[in-house]
Image: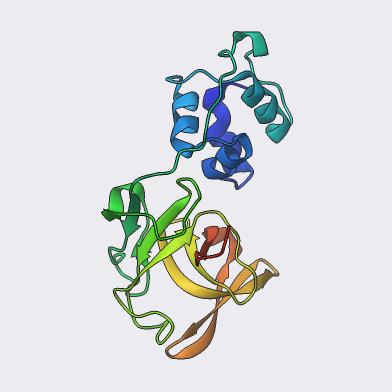
């Protein structure tokens, strides 16, 4: 397996680069540079990548860069998503090209750059959240039942709802205005991201 094969292998596993970056104790931008060949992979990373995918990289540990201390980056600005998606009043456009602003991390945030902000569209989550309100989202942290989350869809849209579980190939959620249950085909859901609150990891 080549380093450049990693994005395709992650898609097959329905995992994200952020998942692998956390496993390697890297910020995602460093992993992207490694995949593109603009950063040399570290020996310990070679071992972890091979364990993660269960196959050998076509690079030996001796070809990798000398091991050096590294620390996880804490970003100075967090992207904000919140453009209304075309054709759906509830969903926001959720793609790198759809960032509307950058804000400081929330108080007490001690993580890396696996955080984003979302500006809500629509009134379906009132009175818990209001249209235009900006909430922090912990990327790729799966929600527990009853937790608020960002549901990311394969068409690069997303919406904030309360997670109620998964079964029989469906993802179940709830909204408050009007109060009703919702369900989506699991195959249409790319990821579930928990709404971050102070005190969470």
State left or right for residue 31 relative to residue 55.
left
Q: Residue at image x 60%, y 60%?
A: 142
Q: Residue at image x 37%, y 57%?
A: 94
| Residue 28: percent from left, percent from top | 48, 38
Q: Quadrant of residue 183?
A: bottom right
Position of the N terminus by quadrant: top right
Q: Nearer the viewer, residue 112 or 92?
A: 112
State left or right for residue 79 relative to residue 196.
left
Position of the C terminus by quadrant: bottom right
Find the residue positioned furthest to the top: 62
Find the residue positioned furthest to the bottom: 178
| Residue 143: percent from left, percent from top | 60, 66
Q: Nearer the viewer, residue 93 or 154?
A: 93
Q: Is residue 91 above or below residue 131?
A: above
State left or right for residue 176 relative to residue 60.
left
Q: Residue at image x 63%, y 15%?
A: 58
Find the residue positioned furthest to the front: 108
Q: Is residue 107 above or below residue 42?
A: below
| Residue 158: percent from left, percent from top | 42, 63
Exactly how many numbered labels are in the figure?
A: 0
Q: Is residue 103 above or below residue 185?
A: above
């Amino acid at each position: 397996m080549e380093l450049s094969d990693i994005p395709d292998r992650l898609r097959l596993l329905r995992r994200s680069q952020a998942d692998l970056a956390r496993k390697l104790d890297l910020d995602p931008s460093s992993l992207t540079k490694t995949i593109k060949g603009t950063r040399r992979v570290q020996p310990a990373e070679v071992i972890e990548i091979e364990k993660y995918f269960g196959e050998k990289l076509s690079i030996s540990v001796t070809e990798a860069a000398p091991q050096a201390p590294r620390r996880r980056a804490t970003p100075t600005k967090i992207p904000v998503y919140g453009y209304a998606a075309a054709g759906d009043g509830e969903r926001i456009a959720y793609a790198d090209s759809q960032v509307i602003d950058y804000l400081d991390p929330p108080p007490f945030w001690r993580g890396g750059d696996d955080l984003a902000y979302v500006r809500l569209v629509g009134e379906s989550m009132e009175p818990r959240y209001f249209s235009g309100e900006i909430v922090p989202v912990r990327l790729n942290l799966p929600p527990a039942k009853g937790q608020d989350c960002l549901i990311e869809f394969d068409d690069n849209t997303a919406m904030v709802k309360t997670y109620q579980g998964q079964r029989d190939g469906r993802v179940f959620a709830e909204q408050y205005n009007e109060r009703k249950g919702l369900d989506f085909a699991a195959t249409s859901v790319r990821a579930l991201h928990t709404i971050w609150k102070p005190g969470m990891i």
